[in-house]
Amino acid sequence: MPLRSRRAGVVGRVAAVDRSELDEFSQQVDQAILAEEDRVVVVRFGHDWDPTCMRMDETLFKIAPKVKNFSVIYLVDITKVPDFNKMYELYDPCTVMFFFRNKHIMVDLGTGNNNKINWPITDGQELIDIIETVYRGARKGRGLVVSPKDYSTKYKY
């Protein structure tokens, strides 16, 4: 089953039809991550119907044309990729992860969890800055980059 793309190939929605295709679906997600050589692969794991994912998806769709030169964005339904759920500990309703040349790129956001973003970012420029930071760091061979903004709660209290 080929990937269906949206918005000039920048945002792809990967969808499977039934449980018999779960392995094939996981392979499609793997292939999407493997195939991209020059851009960061941004993968949003979650559900289309989840309010958290809806807010994040809105931001992703809004920024997609602005980041198309250095990233490609995929939306993946977590019920279709049980292998990924275990491998990446996808327990949150909405999770965003970054890959570059088939390598998971971690981001230090100040939250203690460097593997993924598990809350909706509604400010498009903030997300663009994070993706650009990931891209610049990954091109230099870094597996961990520091976010331009600290998302820890230490300054909120």
Image (cartoon, helix red, strand yellow):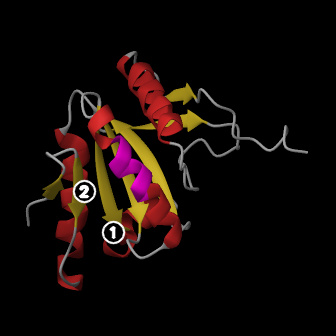
Element carrying mark 2: helix
Amino acid carrying mark 2 in the image:
Val
Residue shown at the point (46%, 22%) measured from the top left? 142
The picture places residue 132, in percent across and down from the top left corner, at 42, 27
Count of marks overlaid on the render = 2
* Disc 2: which residue: 29
User: The C terminus lies in which quarter of the figure?
Assistant: top right
Most foreground residue, 134 or 149: 149
User: The N terminus lies in which quarter of the figure?
Assistant: bottom left
C-beta proximity under 8 Å, tags 1 and 2: yes
Can you tell which mark lies on residue 147?
A: none
In the rendered view, would you say 68 is above or below 52?
A: above
Most foreground residue, 50 or 2: 50
Where residue 147 sits, quadrant-wise, is: top right
Residue shown at the point (53%, 29%) measured from the top left? 144
Counting residues from the start of the chain, the first of labels 1 and 2 encountered is 2
Residue shown at the point (55%, 35%) measured from the top left? 107
Label 2 Cα neighbours within 10 Å, binned few <14 / some 14-19 / many ≥20: many
Amino acid carrying mark 1 in the image:
Val
Q: Which residues are magenta?
A: 57-63
Most foreground residue, 126 or 147: 126
* Disc 1: which residue: 81
Label 1 Cα neighbours within 10 Å, binned few <14 / some 14-19 / many ≥20: many
Q: Was residue 76 drawn as part of the magenta stretch in this picture?
A: no
The picture places residue 55, in percent across and down from the top left corner, at 49, 60
In the rendered view, would you say 74 is above or below 147?
A: below
Residue that sits furthest to the right in the current view: 157
Q: CA distance from mark 1 to mark 2?
A: 8 Å
Please indicate, yes or no, whether residue 86 appears anywhere in the rendered image. no
The picture places residue 25, in percent across and down from the top left corner, at 21, 67
Element carrying mark 1: loop
